[in-house]
């Protein structure tokens, strides 16, 4: 079935470091891909999305490119801040299969000053 | 303000004592869903509802019940809670639950079953 695999955390970085959080997927057809972020004590919020191959989603300095050839949707940011500390979830939606959003296990990011 | 409201935020109970976690949204969304979040397992869907009086099982429905009598409310009911239901629970909603829609999440309910 459809699935999402994320790198295990925590990812620990100093402020202004470059961030990459890996996400790969398995899906039938052409899924839409999402990154959600969960700040401490809050619910998940949509960070960015991409709906077709080679699309780049971007928001708040974060970017992710939908790579069909490598079935990946890695999250990147050029210079992280302490306020970016959160748990990041990669997710996919495929109408071919279960017609629902499938989440990865989440990756915790900790940014230190 | 558009929001999904869950109550309570924290709940400690004992095995077998029935409880209800409430969820309400003010966006006139048709689709609502419950998830549980556990370390190393991410978010798993418990139940979802495509509209009033329409509910369906998600991936982990055992031990839970839901109802959708009104569009805005989608309570999660644990008839006889057990310790393995200790978890962080989230309610979510979207317009139709399909396609590329954004899911709106509540702030979560941390449940501990002793």
Image (tube, coloured by chain):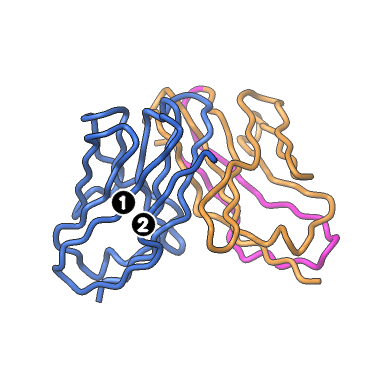
Chain colours: A orange, B blue
Q: Chain under label 1?
A: B
Q: Residue at x 24, y 48 (%)?
A: B61
Q: Does residue B14 appear to the left or right of A44 in the view shown?
A: left
| Count of numbered circles on the image | 2
Position of residue A90 relative to residue B14, above or below, is above
Residue B16 magenta = no
Q: Which mark is residue A43?
A: none
Q: In the rendered structure, are the residues bearing label 1 and label 2 in contact, judged by CB atoms less than 8 Å apart? A: yes
Q: Residue drawn 36% across and 57% down?
A: B7
- Residue at the spot x=39%, y=60% of the render? B109
Q: Earlier in the sequence, mark 1 or mark 2?
A: 2
x and y, in percent, of residue A44 in the image: 53, 49
Image quadrant assignment for residue B84: bottom left
- Using the image as rendered, state which of residue A37 and residue A12 is in the foreground: A37
Q: Which mark is residue B7?
A: 2
Q: Report the chain holding disc 2.
A: B
Q: Is residue A16 left or right of residue A24?
A: right
Badge 2: residue crowd in 10 Å (few <14, some 14–19, many ≥20): some
Which range of residues does the magenta coloring cover? A3-29
Secondary element at image label 2: strand
Label 1: which secondary element? strand
- Residue A14 x/y as whole percent: 80, 68
Q: Which residue is mark 1?
A: B22
- Percent across and percent down for residue A49 are 63, 34
Query: In the picture shown, does residue B16 fall above or below B71?
Result: below
Q: Nearer the viewer, residue B94 or A99?
A: B94
Residue at 54% from the left image edge and 39% from the top image edge? A25
């Amino acid at each position: 079935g459809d699935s999402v695999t994320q790198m295990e955390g925590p990812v620990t970085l100093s402020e202004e470091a470059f961030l990459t959080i890996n996400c790969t997927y398995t899906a039938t057809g052409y899924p839409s891909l999402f990154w959600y972020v969960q700040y401490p004590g809050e619910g998940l919020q949509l960070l960015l999305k991409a709906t077709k191959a080679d699309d780049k989603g971007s928001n708040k300095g974060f970017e992710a490119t939908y790579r069909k050839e490598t079935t990946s949707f890695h999250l990147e940011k050029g210079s992280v801040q302490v306020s970016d500390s959160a748990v990041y979830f990669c997710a996919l939606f495929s109408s071919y299969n279960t017609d629902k959003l499938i989440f990865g296990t989440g990756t915790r990011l900790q940014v230190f000053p | 303000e558009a929001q999904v409201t869950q109550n309570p935020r924290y709940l400690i109970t004992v095995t077998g004592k029935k409880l209800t976690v409430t969820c309400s949204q003010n966006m006139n969304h048709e689709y609502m869903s419950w998830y549980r979040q556990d370390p190393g397992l991410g978010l798993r869907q418990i139940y979802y509802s495509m509209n009033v009086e329409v509910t369906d099982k998600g991936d982990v429905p055992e031990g839970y019940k839901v109802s959708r009598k009104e569009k805005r409310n989608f309570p999660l009911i644990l008839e006889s809670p057990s310790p393995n239901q200790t978890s962080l629970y989230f309610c979510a909603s979207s317009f139709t639950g399909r396609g590329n829609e954004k899911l709106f999440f509540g702030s979560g309910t941390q449940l501990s079953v002793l």
